[in-house]
Image (cartoon, rainbow, N blue to C red):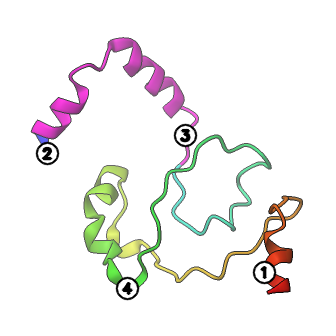
Amino acid sequence: MLKKSRALLKDFAPADARHLAAGGEQARLLTKAAHDTPELAEASVRLVVTSPPFLTVVNYRMDNWLRCWFCGIDPADVRITKPAAPRPLAGRDDGGLARAAAAS
């Protein structure tokens, strides 16, 4: 892991480190369903980092222990839920997909 980290950071300039540190001051880590985030102001999110749900194929707690460790999270405390079927966001144009699906 150290070898990989060193390779990834070999061209990392001090200015890059300062830029990331400044951005980190405003960063938030949420470990819950994305549709339930009342603590985030409307249209305030600039970046979302996630991974697709693999459901029963991946043991999230065991396979993500290192991520949890870096974030100070106990993997046993991570609640895993099966996502509901996606639904369109209010006020967002889906390009006619909902109408096409209803017509088929």
Residue 70 position (above or below residue 58): above
Give whichever of discs 3 and 2 has the lower sequence position. Answer: 2
Ranked by sequence position, the earlier of labels 4 and 2 is: 2
The residue segment tinted magenta is: 3-28
Disc number at residue 101? 1
Q: Nearer the viewer, mark 1 or mark 3?
A: 1
**Residue 7 located left or right of residue 86:** left
Residue under label 4: 56
Q: Amino acid at mark 3?
A: Ala
Residue marked by disc 3: 27
Q: Nearer the viewer, mark 3 or mark 2?
A: 2
Q: Of helix, strand and loop, which one carries label 1?
A: helix
Provide the major secondary structure of the magenta segment: helix
First of labels 1, 4 by sequence position = 4
Q: Is residue 44 above or below residue 58?
A: above
Residue 4 is a magenta residue = yes
